[in-house]
Structures are given as C-alpha cells and as structure tokens.
C-alpha cells in the first residue's frame, strides 16, 4: 500500500521523459517515422501553473492511469454509441446517478442537457435546432446566476428569462418554459436562494433543472441530484484531473438518453460536440480514480505544504503578508494570498503577474483583484472594497519541486522592488 505522499507523487507528476512509447520528443525519429516536436520547438513555452485547472491555461497534468487508458483506447476501433452507453452506465454507478454520459467539457454537457430539455428525442425537433420557434424555448435563471459560460445553454436557441427571486421564477413558468438553470458557485458567493430552494420551484412546477457544477468537487451522493436537479454538469478536466476536453453530464435516465441523441456521432446540431473514444475512456478512469483511487486528505496535505514553502520564503520581506485559506470558492484547493504595501514594495500586482509570466521559469499567477474565487465570502469581500492587494496562488496544480521555484522567483521580484 503506497504512502499518501507516494500516491500523490505517482498520480500527479509529469513523466520524467516525454515520448514514453519509444520516440523521444525533439529527437531524431526512427526511419520512416516523423519527428515529434516539443512545445518549445513549436514556440510555445510551458509554465508553472499557480492558477488552477483553468481551460485557457490547459487544465492540469493528467494522472498516469488516465494517460495509459487513453493510449489503450487509441489502439482499437469501437462503436461510439455502444461505448457512450457502456461508459455512461459505469460512471453513473460510480457517481451514484441514474445515468451519465461523457461530453465535450462541462460546456458540452450544458449544451447537450439543454437540447435534451428543448428538443428531446423528436428527430424533427432535433433537426430544427437552433431554430426553437416551435418548441419550449425559455430557460429561467436568477440574475445572479448569469455567467459567461451559459453561452453553451443559449447556443441551443433558447431565451434566458432572468428573474430577481424565487417568487418571480415561479410566476414566470409557462408553456414555453423548457428548463431552469442554476450555478452552485453563484449561489454560494453571490447570495440569494440556496440551490435546494431553487430546485423546489422547479420540482413543484414540473420543470427540468440543470445544474452547472463544472468546477465543484464531485460527491457521492451528489447533493444537487439529491436536492431534485434533473441534470448535473461536471468538468472532466478540473478536480477530476481527467482529459481537459471532457465533461460529465449525469442525472435522469430519460434526459441523458435524449442528450446523447442531440450530440455526435449523430448528424445534428450537436455534431460539433464530438468526443473521441480516447477521451471517453480517459474520463471514466478519472472518475474512478476520484472516488476509488485518490487520497484526497493526502492531496490537501501536499498542496498545503507547497503553499507553506512559498509563505516561508516571502513573508520575511518588509510589508509582505501571507494568508492561507483551507478552501477556495470551489472547495477544491487551499489558496494562498501574498500581499504587500505599495509604499514599501514598488511593483503592482499586475506588473508582478506580467513579469512572472514573461520571465524564467515562466509562472502564471493571478492578482487578488482578478478573483477567480476568493473563497465562500467573495461577495462580502468585493462589497466591502477590501480586496487584498497582491497575488493569489492555488497550489493544487503545482508539481513536486515547483513550489521552491515559485518561492524563489516571487521572493526575488519582491526584493528587487523594495
């Protein structure tokens, strides 16, 4: 039985060498084979990720088990419809849902789930999307739950009907209402009704509910399904550390069946939501690892240790303050805030982020003003105007040895501007 730290090390570290199949990246290839370039040879410089599993920064390093499964899957041809059904059944068993499917990210799950609620399994209606003029095409949402990512919902051709409170939501239900959309992060950080209270409105009215839990910690039993949500979306590449291009849509069996009919490999509006056999199998292993293989206590312990390495290096500098919180707004990772007085250390957080990203080693870190989840009290923090002046570090996407590199670089830049 591996120790906690051995498990985290083996699961989260990038392989020491690329090209483990026998061809080294950046080296001469055997006769008749192409040379596999490195990122650097393509002009793309990798970086140390202090931000988290954000899509624009390519998520995270997938565990060895996921890589191995994707490699295995790539070596065989299988019917995608059969594979989706089989893998969905297994994921549903693991996650404690009636049914599930692998999607193209959480956005693909939102798109497919919405299409299921709007067009259902009617071939004629599916063929009409995104023209929803003859279908139920209104989605109710609290104004505080409007997010950039709900574009995946709108893309189906629906109208987002915004309401201020649950009374307005209940009154807005009509024969055109296809779905209610809700986001746990917004419910936690923006105030207003709980996710459970929103579900009560939908359940009472008989309207399907879709929950965007993209970056949330997957749970068994799932709190949102238990509250009455019909569909729940998770990202495959965030806490699950699966393929970044995947997501999981889980919930009511009939709606998952309809969601599959609204996506690839069928020639319909969802054809662009194609997910390959490699990603489908990789997502399955990531889900299995989350519930049955990963030691979450060990991971938190390791991530906190990474944060303390940085704290120990920088907090001796004049005016520098550090604060380590056990959970970020997504309840996934500890997060560290490093602040300083602009009168003492004459570099702005924005300039710090720029220099970190442009220098060597290349480090991506965000400012406290950027937010990205200041914690459960983010709304209160922003309303008070007391946003920390400094940087935020989420250590869960650091790999062994990188905390020391971040600490050295951050210390050097702060010291240089005293």
Image (spheres, helix red, strand yellow):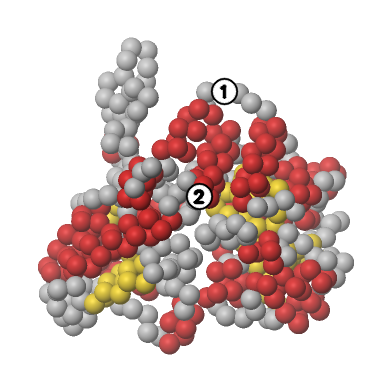
The residue carrying pointer 2 sits among few (fewer than 14), some (14 to 19) or many (20 or more) residues within 10 Å by Cα, namely many
Q: Looking at the image, which residue is at 77% across and 62% down?
A: 208
- The numbered mark, 1 or 2, whose residue comes first in the sequence reads 1
Residue 85, image x, y percentages:
70, 38
Mark 2: secondary structure? helix
Residue 186, image x, y percentages:
57, 72
Mark on residue 206? none
Mark 1: secondary structure? loop
Residue 319, image x, y percentages:
18, 80
Mark on residue 76? 1
Q: Looking at the image, which residue is at 44% across and 73% down?
A: 375
Q: Considering the image in quadrants, where does the N terminus appear?
A: top left
Nearer-the-camera pick, 221 or 418: 221
Report the residue that reaches farthest toward the bottom.
384
Q: Is residue 124 left or right of residue 105?
A: right
Q: Looking at the image, which residue is at 60% across and 23% down?
A: 77
Q: In this view, does 23 lie to the left or right of 101?
A: left
Q: Looking at the image, which residue is at 14% across and 73% down?
A: 316
- C-beta proximity under 8 Å, tags 1 and 2: no
Report the residue that reaches farthest toward the top.
31
Residue 62, image x, y percentages:
42, 43
Count of labels in the image: 2
């Amino acid at each position: 039985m591996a120790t906690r730290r051995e498990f985290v090390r083996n699961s989260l570290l990038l392989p020491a060498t690329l090209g483990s199949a026998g061809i080294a990246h950046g080296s001469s290839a055997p006769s008749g084979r192409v040379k596999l370039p490195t990122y650097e040879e393509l002009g793309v410089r990798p970086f140390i990720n202090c931000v988290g599993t954000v899509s624009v920064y390519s998520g995270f390093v997938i565990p060895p088990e996921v890589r191995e499964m994707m490699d295995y899957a790539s070596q065989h041809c299988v019917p995608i419809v059969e594979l989706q059904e089989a893998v969905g059944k297994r994921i549903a068993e693991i996650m404690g849902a009636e049914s599930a499917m692998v999607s193209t990210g959480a956005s693909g799950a939102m798109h497919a789930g919405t299409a299921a609620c709007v067009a259902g399994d009617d071939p004629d209606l599916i063929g009409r999307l995104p023209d929803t003029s003859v279908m139920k095409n209104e989605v109710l949402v609290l104004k505080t739950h409007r997010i950039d990512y709900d574009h995946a919902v709108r893309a189906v051709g629906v109208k987002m009907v915004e309401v201020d409170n649950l009374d307005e939501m209940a009154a807005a239900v009509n024969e055109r209402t296809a779905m209610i959309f809700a986001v746990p992060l917004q419910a936690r950080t923006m105030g207003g009704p709980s996710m459970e209270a929103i579900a009560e409105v939908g359940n009472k009215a008989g309207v399907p509910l879709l929950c965007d839990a993209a970056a949330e910690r997957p749970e068994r039993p799932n709190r949102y399904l238990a509250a009455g949500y019909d569909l729940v979306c998770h990202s495959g590449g965030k806490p699950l550390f699966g393929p970044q291009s995947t997501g999981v849509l889980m919930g009511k069996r009939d709606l998952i069946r309809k969601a599959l009919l609204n996506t690839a490999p069928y020639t319909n509006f969802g054809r662009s939501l194609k997910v390959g056999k490699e990603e489908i199998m990789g997502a399955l292993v990531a889900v299995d690892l989350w519930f049955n293989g990963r030691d979450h206590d060990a991971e938190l312990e390791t991530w906190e240790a990474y944060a303390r390495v940085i704290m120990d290096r920088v907090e001796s500098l004049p005016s520098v303050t550090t604060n380590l919180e056990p959970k970020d707004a997504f309840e996934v990772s500890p997060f560290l805030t490093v602040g300083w007085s602009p009168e003492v250390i004459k570099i702005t957080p924005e300039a710090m982020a720029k220099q970190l990203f442009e220098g060597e080693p290349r480090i991506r870190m965000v400012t406290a003003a950027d937010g990205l989840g200041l914690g459960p009290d983010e709304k209160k923090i922003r309303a008070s105007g007391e946003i920390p002046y400094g940087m935020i570090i989420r250590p869960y996407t650091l790999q062994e040895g990188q905390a020391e590199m971040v600490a050295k670089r951050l210390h050097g830049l702060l010291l240089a501007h005293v």
